[in-house]
Structures are given as C-alpha cells and as structure tokens.
Image (cartoon, grey):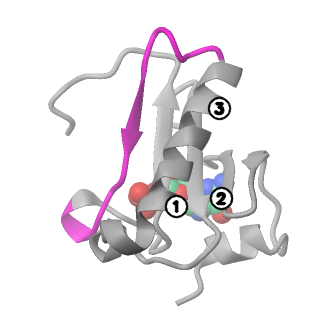
Amino acid sequence: MATIFSKIINREIPADIVYETENVLAFRDINPQAPVHILIIPKIEIPSAREINGKEHGQLLGEMFDVANEIAKKEGIFEEGFRLVFNSGPNAGQEVYHIHMHLLGGRKFKWPPG
Ligand code: 5GP
C-alpha cells in the first residue's frame, strides 16, 4: 500500500534528498534524532523488514547498505561510526509501512535502545 514515502519518491511532496540510484532513494528525516538522520528506502513498496527474503531482495538490500556507506562517507561519519536501524512492526515503533533504513550518526548512541 502506498505511503507518504511513495509521494516523496514520486516528487509529490518535498524532501531533502541526499542520494538516489535507480532502485534506492535517501532523504533527511523530518524529525531528526541525531545530527545525521537519513532514511534510505527502496523505490518499490515493501511494508517492513518482515516481508524481506534473501532470495528476492538480497541485491536490493546490498544496494541499500552501499548507499548507507556512501552517505556516511559524504557526511563525514564513516570512521567514527553510525547506527543503521530497521524498525519492524508495532513493538519496534514502526510508523511508516514502507521499509526504510535509518542512518543515524554524529553523536554517541546508547545500548540497549529504549
Ligand atoms: P519509523 O518509526 O517508521 O521507523 O520511522 C519513520 C520515520 O519517518 C520517522 O523518523 C519520521 O520522522 C519520518 N518521517 C515521517 N514522515 C516523513 C516525511 O513526510 N518526510 C520525512 N523526510 N520524514 C518523515
């Protein structure tokens, strides 16, 4: 089902887009939780990580990680480290049911998360 992220992909609503490939789009989170907070999404609609399987989506996921590493380098946080998160389903607090990888960086994070 289409979400607000489909509208960002289709340029129907604005977003601060930082990276784009044929299959993947990355843009700044509207409510950043760290100095660097970027969402990396596939252009195809997959609701959450629970619908991922390696056979079908392995290449796409690999591309999302490539994009995350490229952005981390561009943002100057590659060496110091960063956090990649997929919130998946209600208990994880997922709000938008178009799978997205959060790239968070620019500060120290605690573990375990809240
Ligand atoms: P989730 O909780 O589903 O893992 O994360 C959804 C993220 O999307 C949240 O961090 C939220 O701030 C972000 N978000 C929701 N709507 C928009 C929007 O319209 N534009 C942008 N750039 N980010 C959004």
Q: Nearer the viewer, mark 1 or mark 3?
A: 1
Identified at 46% across, 9% down, the residue is: 80
User: Which three-letter amino acid code belongs to the residue tagged 2?
Assistant: Val
Where is residue 61? Give x, y as percent.
Answer: 46, 56
Q: Are marks 1 and 2 in contact (CB under 8 Å)?
A: yes
Look at the image and give the residue range highlighted in magenta: 76-91
Q: Are marks 1 and 3 in contact (CB under 8 Å)?
A: no
Please tell me whether mark 3 sits on a helix, a strand or a loop: helix
Q: Quadrant of residue 25?
A: bottom right
Q: Quadrant of residue 43?
A: bottom right
Classify mark 1: residues with Cα within 10 Å, few (<14), some (14-19) or many (20+): some
Identified at 34% across, 71% down, the residue is: 55
Where is residue 62? Give x, y as percent.
Answer: 48, 50
Residue placed most toward the observer, 10 or 33: 10
Q: Which residue is mark 3?
A: 71
User: Which three-letter amino acid code belongs to the residue tagged 1?
Assistant: Leu
Does the magenta segment cover residue 63? no
Which is nearer the N-term, disc 1 or disc 3? 1
Answer yes or no: is residue 81 visible: yes
Where is residue 6? Give x, y as percent.
Answer: 67, 76
Q: Residue 24 got which mark?
A: 2
Q: Nearer the viewer, mark 1 or mark 2?
A: 1
Q: Which residue is mark 1?
A: 60
Does the magenta segment cover residue 89? yes
Say whether residue 101 is left or right of residue 12. Answer: left
Which is nearer the N-term, disc 1 or disc 2? 2
Q: Residue furthest bottom?
A: 1
Classify mark 3: residues with Cα within 10 Å, few (<14), some (14-19) or many (20+): many
Classify mark 2: residues with Cα within 10 Å, few (<14), some (14-19) or many (20+): some
Q: Are marks 3 and 2 in contact (CB under 8 Å)?
A: no
Q: CA distance from mark 3 to mark 2?
A: 12 Å
Which is nearer the N-term, disc 3 or disc 2? 2
